Amino acid sequence: MTLDLGFLLGQFLAALASASALFLVASGLSIIFGVTRIVNFAHGSFYMLGAYLGYTITEALPTGVLGFWGGTLVAALAVGVIGAAIEIVVLRRIYRSPELFQLVATFAIVLIIQDATLYVWGPVERLGPRAPGLDGAVQILGEYVPEYDLALIAIGPVVLGLIWLVFHRTRWGVLVRAATEDREMVGALGVNQSWLFTTVFFLGSALAGLGGALQVPRESVSLLMDLNIIAEVFVVVVIGGMGSVLGAYVAALLIALFNAFGILILPEISLAVPFIVMAVVLIARPWGLFGRPESGEHQQALSEEPLRPLGLARRAAILAGVAGLAGLAFLGGRYGVVLATDIVIVSLFAASLHFMMGLGGMASFGHAAYFGISAYAAAFLATYAGLSMLPAMLLAPVAAMLAAAFFGWFCVRSTGVYLAMLTLAAAQIVWSVVFQASEITGGDDGILGVWPDKWAKSREVYFLLTLAIGAMALVTLQRIAHAPFGYVLRAARDNRLRAEAVGVDTRNHQWAAFVVSGVFAGIAGVLFVFAKGSIFPDELAIPRSFDALLMVLLGGVQSVFGPLLGAASFTYVRDEISRLEYWRFIFGILIILVVILAPDGIAGGLQRLWRWIAARAGFRRVTPDKAEGA
Amino acid sequence: MAAAAAAMLGATALGTGALAEEPIKVGELNSYTRMAAFTDPYKKGWELALEEINAAGGVRGRPLEVISRDDDGKPADAVRIAEELVSEDEVVLLWGTFLSNIGLAVADFAAQREVLFVAAEPLSDAVTMEKGNPYTFRLRPSTGMQARMLAEVAAKLPAKRWATVAPNYAYGQDAVAKFKTALTALRPDVEFVGEQWPGLFKIDAAATVRALDAVEPEAIYNVTFGGDLAKFVREGQLRGLFKGRDVVSLLTGEPEYLLPLGAEAPEGWIVTGYPVEDLGDDPNHKPFLEAYQAKWGELPQLGSIVGYVTLKAVAAAIEKAESLETEDLVAAMENLTFDSPVGPVTFRDIDNQATLGAWVGRTALKDGRGVMVDWSYADGADYMASPEEVAATRPAE
């Protein structure tokens, strides 16, 4: 490959065009986060909606320059209206919930928009028209540069300038900046927050829609667009500093350049490049390039009941639960066994995440990494090293432990959303390496033929094995939570300053918790790989991490039973409805209902229900320190 | 024992009719949302076949029922759904799938759970060769067979410097390797000067096109399809990649990939595909064409044939088998010959591959859309792997 000047310039211009496209979407997300503090995973869906609407509207309008650009603007505004509507109908009801709970709601919106788009536009990809007047290419230094790319290169800075004008020359913009700085104070000064939030959502969504609509001449419009872009957009926002629009532009540029030139130097890990950049930036500047430390005094600490050792009654209840699950499995026939196996595995996976989230106070957006690494390790041991099942199961979680120790060391140096973003970066790096190292991992084809040994081949025997290992692991996690280590961990979570004042090395304790959590996720991973007989990169990807996050949050972070309840109901309900054509839509609605009705999760909701019934029935066995949900 | 149960039931007031009506269930899975362009005509194809089968009295005197599921384009989901179909719905066999990695995953599952799997579309040679197993059969001509068909034409081109572009998974890797082997055998003087491996549905078309252009090939072998193909074609035309270069392209002549390109469809590419508009006079094809158009009011696409023929094969196997037990069904599949819109097709017993062929021709523009011209039908039987190759590659049973 000749690396002459023309080629480098071509690569540079292509990078600038991608940067503009990325910036439009990222700026909207950054603005939304800055003001509302919502980690909006539905932002990619707004982008996708913008593309579909842009396609449909420009097709309907007369072809021509005016039709195309007019249609693009209309599509952006329409997406803005949809975003505002979602804010009013759903998100407004949950601003008081813990920060991460809103993330669950936005994930439900992703599911709903997926199926709504499928319903309206159908599953076939649409190839939109090229931009009228910009459908050719010009030659610069012998390189073909598409005219439309040149337009995009200009659009990015123009939009950046417009946003700057709005933010610095209008009263609304001043309020937005003030709210980004300190939204409680803005509220205290009498500004109507609901109105501010809705308008911010409108602007942010419209920007995402614009980004999507402008993508129509470059690629075919498909249902994959939302998840394909969301990770990269988050990377850009985090690198730039959450809430900073200028930061988003600089970061988009940085990522696009690294992508364009990284692919020339290290094509093998090109997918990992943005995440490596993000990890490096966050380690050097924990709040991104242009971000500021979150003002600590406003952080909502989760006020939680202290954990109490389980009473006899509860222990009996657990035993009954295990026995019940076993019984159910066998009464449910062959498929009951399969489903129960899945439930045990995801329960353990969710419980391992809960350990670091609930007890350690560290949310992870990338917990699937440890689940997947261990599963892959087991697959390697079984196929390449020819180990039989039990030794492979025993050894594989060591890989998860090492990975958790490595990534955890970096992650625990950060807090809150930024820590979560580092875990996401770690998981995405692992995912891209596994995905691209196809000689070893099989890439998209995965590793097949990782079946249990003959004695455990039948579904029933394997279920019992899973149940035994899973139950032991869960009990062990419980023991750790109630050991002195668990107490210290919770102290560090609730008040880092005081914990350190009494001499606790909080960071090392959190690191250790990270590793423990990774190991138990790894145990779930080995159980998984032998249950399915195969492993694919999807098991390390964002949706798998989010499944766990959803289970923990929906189940209830504040209860030890939360993740188990969450995992069981999540798996069972999804299995029940997944045969329906638009099951994602239904699932999304169900999640939103839980989020609104039980902001403390299913466990918390059930507890409140029980107390309510108990109070009604007149027997007052209510705990003395009745710290109801947050 | 089943007979005893039947006798007992028959003795009740219900009569024997109730039992005879009990349908035979087969489990089908495919990427209905992820690969809709192909799977929509595919589904229409097998629905037509199902209608015809049941109108003619079903199979073994019982109606045939297809339980169809969407695998979401993910192999892990496909394995989960295959398990559901087998253990919850208790289907007698599995069939379907599109992507090669999904086909391979389901094939592995089928071998483990000892259930028959008839792969409709996954083309990777590995399905019947390197990772072949006694429970898995495949209908469509493999990448190896199609690559040999294309290489015959490509060998006649003057081009010596070749570059390849293919999605980076089982199908793409196989398709490139097999084409290289086939072309080099016919033309030892060609050299392959560059290759691009964009992720499936993750193509960065601009980068891919620029990289291909940079190695200055005389001809390009393309394996991308669907949305990746659309992006590749658009960027390639924009940046002048195809100017003065021959392009040989797998599957691009299939209406499901050619039609979405509209007037941007490339001209003069050497492709495998389906020249449906020219087949109205073919005596084998005519009844299918007419029935399909009568039912759906549109022309069939290649997926329609695949769906239609696969279900016909499944029905023929069930009819021929001694019982509905897996081993009898597998035995029935071996050397099974049945009629299809391209004439009789046989599942060869040494590698479980069917003799279905493919149409080879060139793309052209007609009325603002892509069509196939100068085509001929290549019978699969002429391009199958040799028995020696099968013996050397396929795992011993």
Image (cartoon, coloured by chain):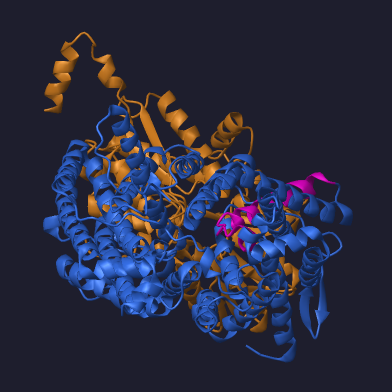
Chain colours: A blue, B orange
> Foreground residue, A348 or A453?
A348
Question: How many numbered badges does the structure rendering display?
Answer: 0
Q: In which quarter of the view is residue A24 placed?
A: bottom right
**Was residue B314 drawn as part of the magenta stretch in this picture?**
no
Is residue A203 left or right of A343 when viewed as pictured? right
**Residue A519, visible in the rendered structure:** no
Residue A112 horizontal side relative to residue A324, left or right: right
- Which residue is pictured at 45% across the width and 68% down the height? B174
Residue at the (64%, 36%) spot, across then down: B298
Residue nearest the observer in this picture, B279 or A536: A536
Residue B247 at x, y = what percent? 64, 69
Provide residue B33's location: percent of width, then percent of height.
Answer: 52, 47
Going by the picture, which residue comes out furthest to the front? A624
With respect to residue A588, does B243 lie above or below?
A: below
User: Image height check: is B282 above or below A543?
Assistant: above
Can you say whether A153 is above or below B354 in the image?
below
Residue A60 highlighted magenta (yes or no) = yes
Q: Residue at x 51, y 53 (%)?
A: A102
Give the position of the N terminus of chain A as an image quadrant: bottom right
Observer-nearest residue: B203 or B263? Answer: B203
**Residue A70 percent coordinates (x, y):** 84, 52
Does the rendering let one see residue A129? yes
A536 left or right of A398?
right
Secondary structure mainly formed by the magenta segment = helix
Q: Position of residue B302 (x, y in %)?
A: 55, 48
In the rendered structure, which segment of residues is drawn in magenta? A32-61
Q: In this image, A259 relative to A417: left or right? A: right
